[in-house]
Every structure is written in C-alpha cells, then in structure tokens.
Image (tube, rainbow, N blue to C red):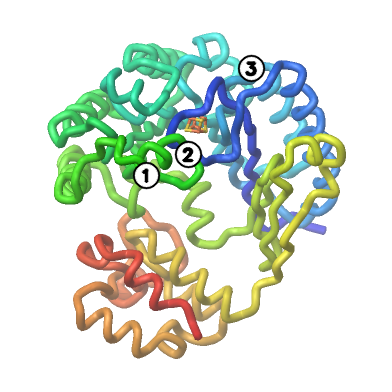
Amino acid sequence: MMANRLLELYIHIPFCVKKCLYCDFLSASASEAEREDYMEALFLEIRERAVECKEYQVCSIFIGGGTPSILPGEQIERMLALIRKHYALTEDAEISIEVNPGTVDEKKLCIYRAAGVNRLSIGLQSTHDRELMALGRIHTWQQFLDTYQWAREAGFDNVNVDLMSALPGQTRESYAESLGRVLNLRPEHISAYSLIVEEGTPFYRAYEKGQLALPDEDTEREMYRDTERLLLEQGYHRYEISNYALPGKECRHNVGYWTRREYLGFGLGAASLMDNTRFHNTAERQAYVESPLQQRQEIQPLKRQEQMEETMYLGLRLTQGVSREEFRQRFGVSPEDIYGPVIEKNRRDGLLEYHRKEEGNTEGCQDGDEMAYLALTPRGLDLSNYVMAQFLLE
Ligand code: SF4
C-alpha cells in the first residue's frame, strides 16, 4: 500500500545529569549501564512498531526528554539509521533534538548534523548565572554561548532557544536583559514560557513554606508583555501562545500537535495519537525496559465530540487559529454549527475573530476568504485558558 498519511515520531530520552529544582518531567539521572539497557529497549520498540506505520510517511521526528544530548552522539546516529531503515520519511522531514549546554561538544553536534538532525532546541532559560543556579540548572551562560557557536559551526541553521520568565530572584530588567542577549544571537526560534510551580518539585515545597521569592503578578504580566514587544520588534512572528519564530521557522512538529496530526511516541511515558485514539507508554522504567512492546496504557478512542473539542482548543493555541474548511472536511459541519453561541459571544467580547490565511501558510484554502480561520484576538491570547475552556462540550 502507498504510504500517504503523514505521521510524526516523538522519542523520549528520560535522563538528565541531575534534576532541576522546578522540573516535573519524566526524567532522572541514571548510570551508563541503565541508559544502555533503556536504549536497547527503545531500539526494539522503534523497530517492532514499524509494522503499524506502513501506510504513513514520517514528516517529523522530535528527540526530547530529559536531556537526549546526555547520550553519546553515536546512539543518536544509530537511532536515526534505524528509523530510516524501517520507516518511510518525507524528503524534507524536520528532525529535532533537545540539547542542554554542559552535555555536548562540537564533535557531538557534528555527529547529529551528519546523522540528519536539522533542528536543535537548546535549553537556556536565563542568561544570568545567578538565576540558572537558583533553578538548579547544570550550566552557565558561557556554556550556552559555546554550545550555540558550535551548533552554528556544525551547520545548524534552525535553532530554538528556550527561555523562562517569572523565576525566583528575576526582575523585569534581568529578564529583558536575557531576552536582549538571546535576540543578539538571532536564533530562528524562541520558546518563552513562564515558570509554573509544579506539585512534587523542590520548588513546590519551598513555595509552600514561603521560601520561594517569585516576582509578583504585575511584574510577571510585564515580563509577558516585554516578551511579545521585544520579539515582534525584532522580526519574530508569534505563531503560538508561547512560541516565536523567524518567518518559515515555526516548529513543524509542534504545529502538528496543535493541528492534531497523528503521532507515535516511543520510550518511557511517550504519548501517541493514532487513528483518533490516544494512548501512552508506561512511566515505569523497569517495566518498559523489560517489555517495551507491552506497555501501552489508557488506550482511549476519541468520540467525534472529543475530536471536535481537541480541534478547537488545540488549534486556538496557534495565532493562525482553526481552519474552518479543515473542520468542515473532518466533521462534515462548520465550527459555527457546533459552537455558534460560544463563537458569537467571544467575538462580541473581542476575544475571537475571523481572518484570512496568514502569509506563507500553504494550507488549502482560498487566499481571499476573509473568514478562513477562527482565531484568538491579541486580548483573547491573554485570556486563552478562559476562552478555550468554553469549547468543551457538555
Ligand atoms: S534538564 Fe530539563 S528535563 Fe532535565 S531536569 Fe532540567 S528541566 Fe527537567
């Protein structure tokens, strides 16, 4: 059968040098032997799942974590060779890997590039060593700068930098300085998130005891506004609530999540959406390593109503918004047929608007259609959670 459906692959590497104090991701430190065992299980899963993907072409691969760059470069090389052997890739597949400063050198980055990785996502968070230390990060600003320079020298022309605001001890000025320093480097993509104090983390415990000196709400809001203003001034396009890119450099893999493209996750805890069914692998490392093919959990076929809800609240994260034509093609009805009163109310409140196709967007709809997309207004973006919650039916 012809491989004609598009699929994204996500590969989870659950290892870090040490745990950052705010982090609740599925990651931990591990010995080299534990990492080796995990990788063997992962390779087995990648190889054996290929049979489920014969009808698909893989259009993006995202190697995330944890800290995938903790692994020897050769293991990433081997993984990508294995994927190429067993899966059909589109010619221009986006292949991203997350990298943390302090775990790579120029040689490793050259191995990635030669293996076909064409996008790097570097975890920086702040350019101030004092703030990095407060977060429990393992690296300094200078180590980031070295990593960034090596990435350019290795030939990477698509680099994301992660930044965080609302950090302990951070001021509006120090955050603006972080943004300015990163903007001077001109990465193709910047992800800018506010710190969320997650339950179960050391930060949460400190917060509970009143020992975490976070910026107040007004300062946090000013940081949020500074992000948008400074990045737009410098020619970045805000294409999602927390993501900015130079034209054409949006992360295709993540856009796929927000437009509900099918994806298959490999590795510990990795989530998938295939055939309108969501499921994920176990979060127990030992169980995964022992039998990586028997660990799918919470297999949840999505009802038509749930698919519509997801289409709306995920699609509205994108500034492009939800394509009304795609919605109609998928469900045989328009968004207004299902959500008429909600859409009207939010339009009246200035939180939603219709607009035409954004420049550079190649999706199939008429250029001139003034109502091709339904999207959040700038004010709606500020209140996105409030608006999106209204698209849950029942
Ligand atoms: S490097 Fe990333 S995944 Fe690892 S502990 Fe820190 S924040 Fe979490």
Which residue is label 1 attached to?
Answer: 208
Assign a secondary structure to mark 1.
helix
Identify which amino acid the numbered label 1 is placed on.
Glu
Assign a secondary structure to mark 2.
loop
Identify which amino acid the numbered label 3 is placed on.
Gly
Which residue is label 3 attached to?
Answer: 73
Q: Which of 287 and 77 is in front in this view?
A: 287
Which residue is label 2 attached to?
Answer: 201
Lower position in the chain sequence, tag 3 or tag 2: 3
Closest to the camera, between mark 1 and mark 2, is 1
Closest to the camera, between mark 3 and mark 2, is 2
Q: Residues within 10 Å of mark 3 (few under 14, many from 20)?
A: some
Q: Quadrant of residue 145?
A: top left
Which quadrant of the figure contains the N terminus? bottom right
Q: Tell me the distance, in whole angstroms, between the alpha carbons under discs 1 and 2.
A: 11 Å
Compared to residue 108, the image places residue 121 above or below, namely below
